[in-house]
Each structure stands twice: as C-alpha cells, then as structure tokens.
C-alpha cells in the first residue's frame, strides 16, 4: 500500500478482507474502460470504485486546512452551492495556520496589471514559471482591493495602503514592503495593504473566519480532525475523498466533486527541513501544526513537487529567534543596536560567518549579487560589549523571559562558556577592532559606519537560532488550482491553494502569500464545487455505506450561542484573535463582584493565560481600564472591550 493513499480491499462477503480484484475482474476492468461504460448503482456487476468503499460521510467538497486559503476555498465553494467539510488538525484556539500569526498584510497592484506583471517577472529572475498560473496570480494582485471588498462586504475606504503620504499609524511598520524590491518596480503602484489601520492583530484572519461561520448552513468545520489519507480510484487516479481521524475514530469522507488541500507548509517537520532546505534546524514563527502531512498524502497520490527549496523568514540576521525547544513556536526579535557598533555574529568555533549589518528582505540577504536565505552554523551567538548592551537595554526584547546572555570579564572566559576556542574568539574580536579602526571590513564588507571598536570588557554572548515564517514548496498546481502529477497532468478532483505548494520560487514580496490564499483559494473552491462526470466502472460488488456524517450534522465552529444572565449580570463581547470573547459581568451596588469569560477561541498558552490574568486585574481595578498583557495585545484589547460593553449596560 502506498503511504498516504487509501486503497480499500473487499470481497463479496467481506469487503475489507478480500483481494482487490480477481484476475478475471482485472481483465474485465480493462474491457469496460475501452468501451467507455459508465457506472450502474447498486448490486453486483458494473459499479464505480467509490461504491466499493464504506463511506462514513458525504459532502460535495472537502477542504483540508483552516487558514486563509482554506477559508477562501470553503467560502467560494459554498457560494457556488456546494456542501463543504472544512478540516483542521489543530484544536480550538490554534486553528488558522500561519494566517493567525502573520502581519495581516496583502500585496496590492492597485489596478496596474502591467506594472504588477513586470515586477513579479523580475522577482522570479532565472526561475521558470508556467504562464497560466503566473497570469492568474498577477491579475489577482492587480485587482485584489476590489476582490477583498466584494468577497467580504468591506468598505474600501477603511483599507490602508502603505504608500507615500499615508497617515496611518501602521504604515510605517510595513513601508519597506511597498515594494520590498524597489529596484524592480517600474512605478509606484505596487504596495502592501491592510484591511484596517493595524498589523499583526489577526484582523484579516478574523474576517475570513467569520465569513466561514456565517455560512454554517453550507460549511461544517471539524477541528482536531487531521486528514490522514487521500482515497483514490486506482484506475483513473481520481481523488474520491479523505480518510479522517476524529474523536478517536477513523472515518472515510466522500468528496463528490473535489478535495482542496490548503494545509500549509512543512515548517515543523525536521526531516523535511533537512532534506529540502538543507538546514539542520529552523524554528517556526507561525503555527506548530504545519508538519508536511498533506505533502506526503499528495506525494502518495502521484503529485509532482515544486519550489521545495523556498522559504521566508523575518527580522535581523536573515531571520533569527530566541532559543526554544524543538516543537515549540519561535519568537522573533529586532534589536538594531546589535546589528551595528561593537557587536558581531559568531558560530560555535568563534569565527564570524556573516555580515551583521546586512538588511533582510523576508529573511533573504544580499550575497554575491542575489538575495538568498543565509545558512547558519549549528550554534550562533551575538557577541557584544557593555556599550552595545547599554544602548540596547531599552529594547522590549531585552525584557523577555527568553533573553539569557552569557557574560564574562574576558573574551577567553566568554569563549569557554559558549564552547568556542578562546584564541579564535580573541582573534576574531581583534580583527574586527582593526577593521573598525581602518573603516574597512575585508572579510564581509560591513559598512564602516556600522562598526565600533569593542570595550575592554565585560563581554556578552547571546545565543540565537535561525527561524522561518513559512515554506513555499509542495505539490505543483496549475492556473485552475489543480494539483499536477509527474507528467504535468491534473490529478482528477484534487486542488490546492495557499502556501501548500506556493507560487513563490525565488524572491518574495511581503503580503504575497496572503494574496495567494485569496486568489487561488477562490479558484480552487470554484473548480472543486463543479459537478463532475460519472466515474469509470468496475466489475465488482458494491458495498453498503454508513453515512452518519452529512452536511449540518456536526461542526466545531459554534456561533450565535446564547448565555443566561440574572438581573444583575451583563454580557459583553470583544473580537480576539480566534473570534469573539464573551464575558459575563456581575454588578451589585455599583461594585463589580465577578467577571467570567464564557467563551473564547484564543490560543490557550498565550491568550488563554492572558485572560486569566486580565479577569483578576479588572476585578482589582473595578474597571476595564487595565494594562494589556505583554505578548497578548489583541486578546487583552478584546477582553477590555467586552468588559466595557457589559459595564455600559449596568449604568
């Protein structure tokens, strides 16, 4: 049995135990295919392969992965009249994939198709790209403002474009991506945009999630329900449905018209990171649930892969994180004071390996005429002196519980603490000091104004790790969002969208993936929803299915719930990262007696813990005017808004 593809075995009396086909049946199968005979429902004789599978549920479309691409695919399929099952392996509070954690920006061609086409042609550089899929992508980017507004019924006047003259408070945070490679821009039309004046606040994700919830009559959502296999007709290679693990049971779910794979990348699969990216380790900044499961499923179904080398990162040094345990989410940092001055980057041996002041474009740095992702040694340290530490001490990252630098009065002592050779580290710093004095760095050509001679001690070494935002590679798709096999032909009824086999092969502009999720999510959803021709026939015996899971039977995305209150209790609602945060506030004699969080879908280890702290702080303050919890700003603001709404009713 091929890994990732379910092939069901059967016989006349025991459909799960017999051989797949007798020799006579196999010969007859070829004859039927040659005659072009269609399926006959029920009984022994000529039936399609899907009638030999025991199905536990049936939908028009099954979408695997509940991030932006999965949401857009599901919404589009539902609006085309299809019944949709949307699956995600993450539990409640963690759904959303990388969309939940990203900057919430999208690349915007602002109606200029020719400029958008020219810019993206330059980003691909020497990398080939199919003209059909390229056309769909650039046309989608050129018209993306209207698309977002029309799809989600939004007011375009509230959109923020990071362009010259913008007074939006968040424009300054994303200005560098408008465009990210200005040397390739033919004019100033291309930029990055936001749906409101805010970044990294899950706003875009919240809108897409709500749009799914609003279609609960058409879309069922199953969380903590990973797809484990694609069920494929062995003759025609048509994808019939998926095998799903849910609540301890293995279920076969039929997808009448198509399966859409939107399950992201392989950032959390160490073996795939090593095999495809050539890095020993890269800590993910986004979701920890992107483990490459869908890649294996599609590979077993015969999919061709593309862009497996491509990935994006962020912040200093081509993408760096605080040190964290394997399997945990990394944390980015940006400390400009340590990219300049008396500060260097060294590997375990104590040698420099990198130009510390080089700008990073989503983790790509300029090396030998091209922008590429840098390769780090096994262990990496920022080595700096007291002057640099004093300059950087006000940075919020220096207050992190994860910031634990080593310190020593001499470089030899510091080298011992980090496992480097003392003579190497001493020579590295001495060489750097001579470069700083001369104003010229022959090793890595660091800018003269970015170098300062080290003090005589104390010295510090802060260990960091290389990190990544997302991988791009996966099953290759065409302009119809169909997944292709090794011959370049579509695998029937199999579609994909988003970062799962993303279009980016080379240089990347910020917001490109979020645009791709919308553009190809819609293409995939529309094509997957189309009614399909009857399947090829077999001379076999049909089996009875037990289809207990049908549209509307079961969903994990509950919306519009009711809550009980007494005469002195008041409900309030705020919008967090995972959706609504609902509170019930009890007020007696003008005093807040109790604050209860009745419902939320915030990430348990961040937003969930923050809510516990916020409840007590609001009680102690007898007010919603409390400080936000560091690292949970969106959750904090939503809780405060919910409490304020409840208290406004008590006046």
Image (spheres, rainbow, N blue to C red):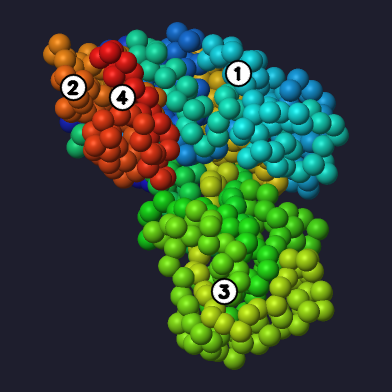
Marks 3 and 4 close (CB-CB < 8 Å): no
Residue 427, quarter of the rendered image: bottom right
Q: Which residue is mark 1?
A: 158
Q: Secondary structure at mark 1?
A: helix
Q: Specify which label sits upstream in the sequence, 1 or 4.
A: 1
Look at the image and tell me in which quarter the N terminus lies.
top left
User: What's the distance in space between the residues labelled 3 and 1, CA to CA?
Assistant: 46 Å
Under circle 3, the secondary element is helix
N-term mark: 3 or 1: 1
Depth check: 168 or 206 in front?
A: 168
- Can you name the residue that lies furthest to the top here? 81
Disc 3 designates what residue? 386
Which residue is most to the front? 589
User: Can you tell which quarter of the image residue 123 is in?
Assistant: top right
Q: Earlier in the sequence, mark 3 or mark 4?
A: 3
Query: In the image, which disc is placed on residue 586?
Result: 2
Q: Position of residue 392 (x, y in %)?
A: 57, 62
Q: Which residue is mark 4?
A: 643
Place of residue 568 in the rendered image (x, y in percent of width and height, measured from the top left): 16, 15
Task: State the residue in front, 527 or 316.
Answer: 316
Q: Nearer the viewer, residue 495 or 396?
A: 396
């Amino acid at each position: 049995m091929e890994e990732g593809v379910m092939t069901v075995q059967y016989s006349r009396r025991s459909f799960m135990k017999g051989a797949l086909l007798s020799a006579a049946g196999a010969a007859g199968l070829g004859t039927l295919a040659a005659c072009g005979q269609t399926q006959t429902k029920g009984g022994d004789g000529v039936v399609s392969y899907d009638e030999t599978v025991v199905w536990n549920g049936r939908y028009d479309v099954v979408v695997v992965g509940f991030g932006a691409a999965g949401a857009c695919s599901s919404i589009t399929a539902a609006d085309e009249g299809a019944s949709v099952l949307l699956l995600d392996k993450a539990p409640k509070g963690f759904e959303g994939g990388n969309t939940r954690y990203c900057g919430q920006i999208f690349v915007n061609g602002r109606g200029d198709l020719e400029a958008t086409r020219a810019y993206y042609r330059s980003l691909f550089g020497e990398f080939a790209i199919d003209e059909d899929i390229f056309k769909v992508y650039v046309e989608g980017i050129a018209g993306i403002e209207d698309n977002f507004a029309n799809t989600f019924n939004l007011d375009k006047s509230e959109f923020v474009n990071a362009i010259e003259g913008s007074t939006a408070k968040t424009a300054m945070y994303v200005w560098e991506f408008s465009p990210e490679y200005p040397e390739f821009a033919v004019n100033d039309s291309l930029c990055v945009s936001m749906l409101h004046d805010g970044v990294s606040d899950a706003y875009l994700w919240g809108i897409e999630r709500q749009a799914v919830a609003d279609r609960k009559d058409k879309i069922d959502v199953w969380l903590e329900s990973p797809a484990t296999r694609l069920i494929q007709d062995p003759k025609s290679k048509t994808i019939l449905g998926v095998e799903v693990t849910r609540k301890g049971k293995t279920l076969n779910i039929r997808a009448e018209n198509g399966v859409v794979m939107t399950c992201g990348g392989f950032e959390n699969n160490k073996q795939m990171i090593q095999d495809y990216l050539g890095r020993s380790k890269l800590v993910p900044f986004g979701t920890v649930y992107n483990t490459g499961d869908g890649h294996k499923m599609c590979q077993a179904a015969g999919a061709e892969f593309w862009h497996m080398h491509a990935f994006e990162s962020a912040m200093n040094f081509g993408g760096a994180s605080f040190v964290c345990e394997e399997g945990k989410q990394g944390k980015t940092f940006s400390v400009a004071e340590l990219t300049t001055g008396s500060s260097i980057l060294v590997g375990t041996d104590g040698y420099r390996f990198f130009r510390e002041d080089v700008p990073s474009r989503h983790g790509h740095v300029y090396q030998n005429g091209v922008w590429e992702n840098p390769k780090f040694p096994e262990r990496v340290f920022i080595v700096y002196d007291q002057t640099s530490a004093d300059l950087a001490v006000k940075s919020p990252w220096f207050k992190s519980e994860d910031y634990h630098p080593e310190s020593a009065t001499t470089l030899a002592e510091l080298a011992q603490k980090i496992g480097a050779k003392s003579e190497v580290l001493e020579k590295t710093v001495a060489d750097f000091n001579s470069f700083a004095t001369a104003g010229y760095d022959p090793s890595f050509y660091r800018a003269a104004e970015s170098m300062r001679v080290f003090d005589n001690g104390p010295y510090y070494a802060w260990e960091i790790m290389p990190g990544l935002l997302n991988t791009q590679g996966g099953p290759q798709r065409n302009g119809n969002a169909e997944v292709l096999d090794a011959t370049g032909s579509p695998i029937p009824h199999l579609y994909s969208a988003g970062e799962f086999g993303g279009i980016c092969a080379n240089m990347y502009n910020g917001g490109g993936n979020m645009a791709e999720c919308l553009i190809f999510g819609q293409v995939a959803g529309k094509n997957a929803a189309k009614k399909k021709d009857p399947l090829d026939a077999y001379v076999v015996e049909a089996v009875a299915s037990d289809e207990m899971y049908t549209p509307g039977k079961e969903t994990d995305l509950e919306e519009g719930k009711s809550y009980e209150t007494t005469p002195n209790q008041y409900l309030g609602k705020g919008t967090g990262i995972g959706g609504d945060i609902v509170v019930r506030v009890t007020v007696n004699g003008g005093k807040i007696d109790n604050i209860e969080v009745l419902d939320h879908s915030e990430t348990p280890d961040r937003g969930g813990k923050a809510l516990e702290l916020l409840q007590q702080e609001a009680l102690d303050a007898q007010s919603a005017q409390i400080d936000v919890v560091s690292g949970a700003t969106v959750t904090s603001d939503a809780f405060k808004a919910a409490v304020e709404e409840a208290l406004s009713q008590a006046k």
